[in-house]
Structures are given as C-alpha cells and as structure tokens.
Image: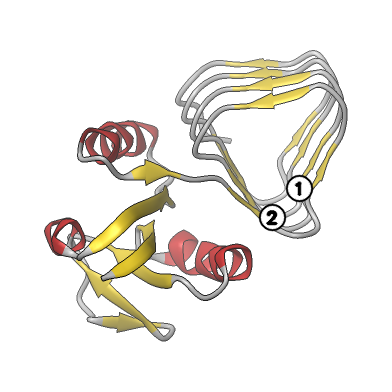
C-alpha cells in the first residue's frame, strides 16, 4: 500500500503545467493524472486514470488538486472529491510571492511568478496562472481563474466563478 498518492485532476493543458509544480512540492510520492475523458494512459511520465480508478487505488491518504478552469466543473469536482474522503491540496510554485495578511482558501493553484501583496482575501479553489498579480485590499470569490498575466490592482472585488 502507498502511504499517499497525489493527483492532478485534469490532464489537458493546465493540468500538464501544474504537474511539475506538484512534483516539486510533494517529492517521492506517487503522482497521477485523473481525467475521465483522457485518450492516453500515460502523459509526461505519469499514469492517467479515471476518477473511479483513482478511488480504487490502495493508499492511506489521497490528495488532489483540480486543474480545470471551468468554475462550475471545479466546484462540482471539489465537492465530489471531499465527499469521497480525498483531500484537496494547495499548489504554489517556488517563486510565488505572498506578502502580509493574505488569506487564500483551500485548493489554490499559484503558478510561477505570481505575486499576492498585502491585505488580500481570496476564496477557495483560486487559480492564478503564470505572471499573475493581486494587489492590496482585493477580495476575490470562490472558484476564480486568472489567465496568464492578469493584473488585479488594489481594492478590486471579483465575484465567485469569474474567469479573466
């Protein structure tokens, strides 16, 4: 039995970008992609399996990060995973900068060169793609996705489920 297995849910473009960040942060644990619509069994050196196959794996603990941009799909998958006892984990590149008094909900993915300055409140399952920026006093809702290079300057309110 494996002690812990980590999965990236979503084996398309963003999932492939997130997997190296996961590998860097969790080390020697088993890593897989979970994707119910995958057309391959291996991707970038990692096994690709359905959610059902992932559930059947023998492990003490299972972790998942959901690398899917669609907010409604991400929310549904988050609830599904948590309901099945799978823990949702955070992913952050080594060069991410997070300053003072920042609160970010569970399930965030912060890609390389992301900066979050001071006094920021961000909901669950936030995705900040490469070179994104969130400045002081911003409030960002749940399941928000930032495309590469999004700049969110100070005192901005973004509702849940938005993509920019």
Location of residue 129 in the rendering, given as x and y in whole percent from the top left corner = 63, 50
Which residue is depicted at the point 38% across and 62% down? 4
Residue 130 is tagged as 2
Which residue is depicted at the point 30% across and 83% down? 42
Precedes in sequence: disc 1 or disc 2: 1
Residue 150 is tagged as none
Location of residue 56 in the rendering, given as x and y in whole percent from the top left corner = 13, 61
**In front: 131, or 36?**
36
Location of residue 52 in the rendering, given as x and y in whole percent from the top left corner = 12, 57
**In front: 159, or 36?**
36
Displayed quadrant of residue 127: top right
Q: Secondary structure at mark 2?
A: loop
Mark 1–mark 2 contact, CB under 8 Å?
Answer: yes
**Is residue 110 found left or right of 149 in the rendered image?**
left
Mark 2: give few (<14), some (14-19) or many (20+) Cα within 10 Å.
many
Location of residue 139 in the rendering, given as x and y in whole percent from the top left corner = 68, 16
Which residue is depicted at the point 23% across and 81% down? 41
**Is residue 41 found left or right of 67 in the rendered image?**
left
Look at the image and tell me in which quarter the C terminus lies: top right
Reply above or below: 20 against 78: below
Q: Secondary structure at mark 1?
A: loop
Question: Which residue was labeled with disc 1?
Answer: 114
**Is residue 135 found left or right of 88 in the rendered image?**
right
Which residue is depicted at the point 38% across and 43% down? 87
């Amino acid at each position: 039995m494996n002690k812990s297995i980590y999965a990236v849910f979503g084996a398309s473009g963003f999932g492939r970008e997130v997997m190296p960040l996961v590998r860097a942060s969790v080390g020697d644990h088993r890593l897989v992609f979970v994707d119910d619509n995958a057309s391959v069994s291996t991707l970038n050196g990692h096994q690709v399996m359905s959610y059902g196959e992932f559930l059947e794996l023998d492990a003490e603990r299972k972790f998942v990060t959901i690398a899917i941009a669609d907010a409604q799909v991400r929310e549904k998958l988050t609830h599904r995973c948590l309901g099945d006892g799978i823990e949702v984990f955070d992913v952050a590149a080594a060069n991410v900068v997070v300053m003072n008094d920042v609160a970010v909900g569970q399930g965030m993915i912060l890609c390389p060169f992301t900066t979050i300055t001071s006094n920021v409140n961000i909901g669950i399952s936030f995705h900040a793609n490469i070179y994104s920026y969130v400045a002081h006093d911003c409030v960002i809702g749940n399941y928000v996705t930032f495309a590469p290079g999004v700049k969110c300057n100070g005192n901005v309110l973004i509702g849940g489920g938005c993509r920019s």
